[in-house]
Amino acid sequence: MTPAPSGALGALEASGLGQAMRQWLWLYPAVEIVHLVGIGLLFGSIVVFDLRLLGFSRRIPIRRLASHVLPWSAGSFLLIVPSGLLMFTAHATDFIDSEVFVLKMLLIMAAGVNAALFHTITFRTADVWDSEEMRKLPPPPSARVAGGLSLAIWISVIACGRLLAYF
Ligand code: HEM
């Protein structure tokens, strides 16, 4: 008997949506372009924030930069997640068996945990460590670690996404 998860995923793959994603010539590439535009928006916005956490462009107050760029990072998921799920329906059983796909999902979760820890702990005290006086010094180690980790994780997610076509 087929185990339930792959049965459910097989049904997803066999659905009208899954079939359309495989059979309509332009659908998969169009959805993939939406995925890539979302990734451009996510990485483009998050990279400037992470570089600021690492200590670059310290003349820009961190809270001001956050309110400018982070809504774009959050909004990018409206493009990335639905398009990712649509592509997933096309070959659900293959993707779930792919170690690269599983790693990509784990990395996305790790990026979420890193961001959540930063926002609930380090960012709360930004008024202190990012005051005009303190801004002459580099941000605290916890901020630099969060920024460095975020950059490394998102680059790895992008790499895994690209590698899905090969492994
Ligand atoms: C959140 C950040 C994400 C990033 C940075 C990302 C990155 C990428 C990249 C770079 C590609 C390759 C595109 C190409 O080669 O043209 C890709 C493809 C793909 N992504 Fe994502 N992705 C993300 C989220 C997701 C999510 C949430 C899903 C949901 C299941 C997903 C599912 C897929 C699938 C199925 C492919 C197609 C692989 C193929 O056809 O070869 N991605 N992703």
Image (spheres, rainbow, N blue to C red):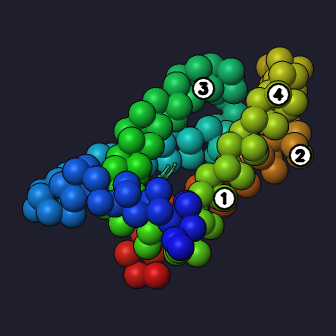
Point out the tag, 4 or 3, that comes first from the N-terminus: 3
Q: Residue furthest bottom?
A: 167
What amino acid type should be assigned to the residue bearing mark 1?
Answer: Leu
Residue 148 lies, with reference to residue 119, above or below; the image says: below
Which comes before the other along the chain, label 2 or label 3?
Answer: 3
Image check: 127 left or right of 19?
A: right
Is 109 positioned to the left or the right of 39 in the image?
right
Q: Which residue is mark 4?
A: 120
> Does label 3 point to a residue whose CB lies under 8 Å from ligand 1?
no
Q: Which residue is mark 3?
A: 65
The disc at residue 139 is: none
Say what amino acid the circle numbered 2 marks: Pro
Q: Residue at x 36, y 66 (%)?
A: 91
The span from disc 2 to disc 3 (Cα, nearest Å) is 19 Å
Residue 159, how many percent across, how many down?
51, 68
**Residue carrying label 2:** 141
Q: Residues within 10 Å of mark 3 (few under 14, many from 20)?
A: few
From the viewer's perspective, is residue 155 above or below residue 113? Answer: below
Residue type highlighted by circle 3: Leu
- Residue 163 position within the rendered picture, expressed as x and y whole percent measured from the top left: 45, 75
Say which of 132 and 141 sits in front.
Answer: 141
Cα separation between marks 1 and 3: 28 Å
